[in-house]
Image (spheres, grey):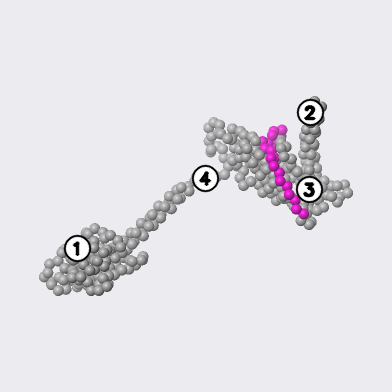
Amino acid sequence: MTKLINQLLFAFILSLSTIAAQALDAQLLPDIKADAVSMQIQDPERAVGYTVGDVITRHIILTVKKPYKLIDESLPIIGYEKRYRGQTLGVDLSDIKHTSKDNGDSVIHDLSLSYQVFTNKTVVKHGALPTEYVNIINVKSKGKEVGKFRIPSFEFAISPIAMFGEVRIEEDMSKFRGPLLLDNSGLKNRLQILLTILALSLIGLLYMLGKHAWLPRMGGPFAKAYRNIRKQDNTPQGLQKAVANTHEALNITAGNSLFSGNLDAFLDKKPAFNAIKPELEQFFGLSRQVFFEPSAHHQAGDDPLIWLAQFCRRCRDCERGLIPDSKT
């Protein structure tokens, strides 16, 4: 039993020595010719915010021109802990995926290297995915020419799980830290809602107070009559024209000549005008005084042209389907 344990320990030590020798030999080899190998490398999108347990993956594509060939045994070894200036880097290779494809005059090697962070500090610590070396051999050279190809390192920042002590962000503007942005998405959504409400309110005011036919149902007969009345002079002739314009609007709305005798039938047909029935009756009294009985009494006040403009405006609200404003 003791002999078996000794053999296992010897094999383990031998394997570690072999790994170290391979790493050392790779760095001592001369660089391979620049035109023999080309590389495309895809590093992680961010270089900050990693903490213990996180996995960082690099995607590397090596194109090796023939007669050069990648030595598969020189690829990085899972679990081998690398050091920098005698200190562990705090990351190790946890997984490697390697596929190759013969492309005629070259071989394309697709490498996916996954490293796991296994260190943590009380402050932000500089970290790096190690520089890797792979060996390339010229299979047609007499001396079996062998050289190394360097895969550069990737620097990043390892964040602490919890902060220690007082932190002043203005004194810790690391180059790994991106710009400090405030999340204003909530304010943007609220602003959009408020702008929508404002736009609807303005449209509503335009619909209620507008004089021109900018929106549907704004160009009705009473809207036109209201514009004409406001242009009339405050004279008997101007009052006659204003009353005539109002009669014309009532007739168009009713579809026939409208007088006080058929007012109830009109209100049954146009129930929106029920709210101003008393004023309709007052209007017919004013019309009788203007056109037929100058001495007749009416209830349009001392300034009938102003009263008539207000009455026509309330009729305009009725034809637009709005509740007429309070009588002035």
Between tags 3 and 2, which lies in front? 2
Whether residue 87 appears in magenta in the rendering, the answer is yes
Q: Residue at x 80, y 36 (%)?
A: 18
Task: Using the image, tell me which numbered label, if any, was put on residue 181.
Answer: 4
Image spot of residue 306 (x, y percent): 21, 64
Seen in the picture, residue 69 relative to 91 is either above or below; the reply is below
Three-letter amino acid code at the position of disc 3: Leu
Image spot of residue 216 (x, y percent): 36, 66
Q: Write down the residue under mark 1.
A: 278
Three-letter amino acid code at the position of disc 2: Ile
Kindly check if marks 1 and 2 are in contact, taking CB atoms under 8 A apart as contact: no
Image spot of residue 294 (x, y percent): 13, 71
In terms of sequence position, does the residue under pointer 2 or pointer 4 come before the other? 2
Three-letter amino acid code at the position of disc 4: Leu
Image spot of residue 103 (x, y percent): 76, 56
Q: Write down the residue under mark 2.
A: 5
Whether residue 282 appears in magenta in the rendering, the answer is no
Kindly check if marks 3 and 1 are in contact, taking CB atoms under 8 A apart as contact: no
| Viewer-closest of 288 and 123 | 288
Q: CA distance from mark 2 to mark 4?
A: 59 Å
Magenta residues span 84-102
Q: CA distance from mark 3 to mark 1?
A: 102 Å
Q: CA distance from mark 1 to mark 2?
A: 114 Å
Q: Secondary structure at mark 3?
A: strand
Residue 291 showing in the rendered view: yes
Q: CA distance from mark 4 to mark 1?
A: 64 Å
Q: Residue at x 67, y 38 (%)?
A: 91
Kindly check if marks 4 and 1 are in contact, taking CB atoms under 8 A apart as contact: no
Q: Write down the residue under mark 3.
A: 70
In terms of sequence position, does the residue under pointer 3 or pointer 4 come before the other? 3
